[in-house]
Image: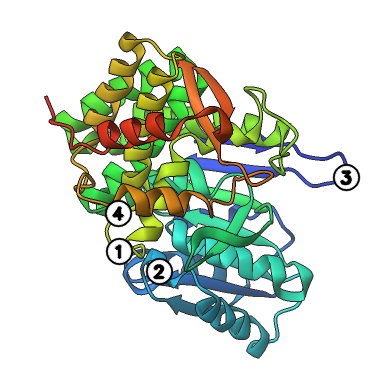
Amino acid sequence: MHRLEISLKQDAPSSQINIGRGIRRKLGQMLPLKTPRRVGIISNKRVFDLYGREVVRSLKAEGCKIFEWLMPDGERYKSFRVLEKAVTFLSENRFERNDLVVALGGGVVGDLAGFSAAIYLRGVPVVQVPTTLLSQVDSSVGGKTGINLPVGKNLVGAFHQPASVFIDTETLTSLPQRELVSGFCEMVKQSLISDRKLYDMTVGCLQKTAAKRDFLVSSEFEDLIAAQCGFKASIVANDERESTSRSDARSRRVLNFGHTTAHALETITSYRTFRHGEAVGYGMLVAGELSKNLGLLDARDLELLRDAVKLCGPLPRADHLDSNQIIRALQHDKKNVDGQINWVLLEAIGRPRIVEGRLISAKALRLSLRAGLKVLERQ
């Protein structure tokens, strides 16, 4: 088992990340908190049917009183309406500030449950138990929580660090292929902004996974998840609140590589066409093309980016979408500063660069969208 720790501000408790096969069955005894009186599990029906009973059994063995609330499944349910129901669930069951929320599920569950915990009684502890690959390497780590608005993704939210994250690699075996593709794309994103070592490690594991799905529960793939989480944890510890005044390569803003276009794609399709990671796959391709068109990225590294995205698996078509709609949606991105789009681009593998939108011509953006949104043929 791997155990990582995110050390934040001096007066704040650290956040633990635990990674191991089958650790959901040991959740109760591994909680980093004094045993809470009440535990509210927020999940969805599919995930709870698969793993809920084992988690409940583990928590009850430690004397916890369990309450369950299941939300609908899908990105479009990260909304005010569903958030109100989650907070009402906590209120009706008289949760107090020393009680605990457990988010059992993928990124949608983690974001909504985390935000509920952040705003109920001005903050109750939350433990993340991510069950999708994307949530394991990305959304469960770092304390970002939130919901969507019709005009844009994650425009309402709060920073609320989990007391602990429990990543059980066994849950990956139950994922549909598209969920794996989504997680693979997020892994590629982090490897491209990290360094060549993580890029090579990620590509090597994707090649092995394509040949044998059982590789997902191997110790080597577990090492990759730990390396991915370790990279993100190092960025979060250095810049927890994503300071808008920073533009260096260790700024938390660099984690948004691929997300500018991705969020626009998700918004204009009402969160019904793309899994988040699939949209990030296209977002990386657009950012790579834009980096090349601005003279930042050479053709060889652009090809490495494209090869890595190809390895993730097939993406839904995006070349038929209206580029004017995409560009309008970009104006509502939550990463905009002083009315300007801020793009995370690449100078090379492991060398992200933040570029202000005013430095990018409309022609360069349209050319990059056209090239980046083409369907990649897998080799």
Q: Residue furthest right?
A: 11
Left-right relation of 308 to 115: left
Which amino acid type corresponds to the residue marked 2 in the rendered image?
Arg
Q: Position of residue 218 (x, y in %)?
A: 31, 32
Nearer the observer: mark 3 or 2; the answer is 2
In the depicted view, which residue is nearer to us: 142 or 173? Answer: 142
| Element assignment for label 3 | loop
Quarter location, residue 362: top left
Can you tell which of label 3 and label 4 is closer to the viewer? 4
**In 3D space, how far apart are the residues under numbered discs 3 and 2 (Cα atoms)?**
36 Å
Q: Can you give x and y, in whole percent of width and height, for residue 368 in the image?
A: 34, 31
Farthest residue, direction bottom = 92
The amino acid type found where label 1 is placed reads: Arg
Q: Residues within 10 Å of mark 2 (few under 14, many from 20)?
A: some
Who comes first in sequence, dot 1 or dot 3? 3
Q: Which mark is residue 274?
A: 4
Please name the residue that numbered disc 1 is placed on: 272
Determine whether label 1 and label 4 are within 8 Å by CB: no
Question: In the picture, which quadrant includes the C terminus?
Answer: top left
Of label 2 and label 1, which has the lower sequence position?
2
Q: Do the residues bearing badges 3 and 4 touch, measured as CB atoms within 8 Å?
A: no
Q: Please report whichever mark, 3 or 4, sits nearer to the chain's N-terminal start.
A: 3
Neighbour class for label 4 at 10 Å: few (<14), some, many (≥20)?
many
Q: Position of residue 179 (x, y in %)?
A: 29, 50
Q: Residue 113 or 245: which is nearer the viewer?
A: 245
Q: Is residue 8 above or below residue 94?
A: above
Question: CB under 8 Å between callouts 1 and 3?
Answer: no
Q: Are marks 2 and 4 in contact (CB under 8 Å)?
A: no
For the residues labelled 3 and 2, say whether their Cβ atoms are less than 8 Å apart.
no
Residue on which the image places disc 3: 11
Q: Which residue is mark 2?
A: 76
Q: Are marks 2 and 1 in contact (CB under 8 Å)?
A: yes
